[in-house]
Image: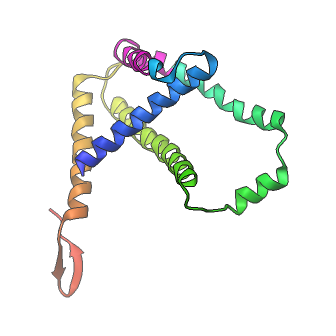
Amino acid sequence: MVVALIAANTINAGADIGAVAAAINMLVPIPIVAMIVPVTASILALQLWGSYRLIERTFKWLTLALFAYIVTAVFVHPGWSEVLTGTFIPAFSFDRKFLAILTAVLGTTVSPMMDVTSYRAAIKLRNTFSGSGPTTECVKTLLNRMRNNVNELCSSVFRPRRSVDGFHSRRHS
């Protein structure tokens, strides 16, 4: 289970980095593949040498880019009856293109929720400990809690059921 989580997170990170490289390609005519290493290096540099405040401010400003969806909707003049129909009565098919889009939509929906959950846990830990920044103790506690959550998830999924007084229940340790 842990291997599957690591694989999923690696694929998710790779897809996110590829998406950033593709977005840069839309602005600057540099091949997407050539942008993957610089994008990855920039993200790592920001995480390793940038402060939490710098990262927070960067993402706050990047959030403004989401308003491009609204602006685009105004400029392309879609058929609003088709948009509303497609919103409330989706059409399903099982061809390769539909499944790729479905995977992208589900991935972009679940990924931010996982990130928000991780950020909330980190903020809660930061607020628990005194001091002005993440301390070694804070990081150790976060890693231990994450490990315990993964262990609990794995044990609850794979733990055999036991009959107690005629009822099936999970054995708790």
Nearer to us in this view, 61 or 81: 81
Q: How many marks?
A: 0
Placement of 156 over or under 57, stated as above or below: below
- Does the magenta portion include 33? no
Q: Position of residue 172 (x, y in %)?
A: 18, 65
Q: Which residues are magenta?
A: 36-56
| 46 horizontally vs 88: left or right | left
Q: Give the image quarter of residue 64.
A: top right
Its colouring scheme is rainbow
Placement of 71 over or under 28, stated as above or below: below
The residue lying furthest to the bottom in this view is 166
Tell me if residue 101 can be seen.
yes
Q: Position of residue 118 (x, y in %)?
A: 38, 38
Q: Position of residue 110 (x, y in %)?
A: 47, 47
Residue positioned 30% across, 42% down in the render: 7
Quadrant, the C terminus: bottom left
Q: Position of residue 114 (x, y in %)?
A: 42, 43
Q: Give the image quarter of residue 8.
A: top left
| 107 horizontally vs 93: left or right | left
Residue positioned 43% across, 15% down in the render: 38
Nearer to us in this view, 120 or 153: 153
Secondary structure that dominates the magenta span: helix
Tell me if residue 61 can be seen.
no
Placement of 152 over or under 38, stated as above or below: below
| 118 horizontally vs 83: left or right | left
- Does the magenta portion include 54? yes
The residue lying furthest to the top in this view is 49
Residue positioned 36% across, 33% down in the render: 122
Residue positioned 81% across, 36% down in the render: 76
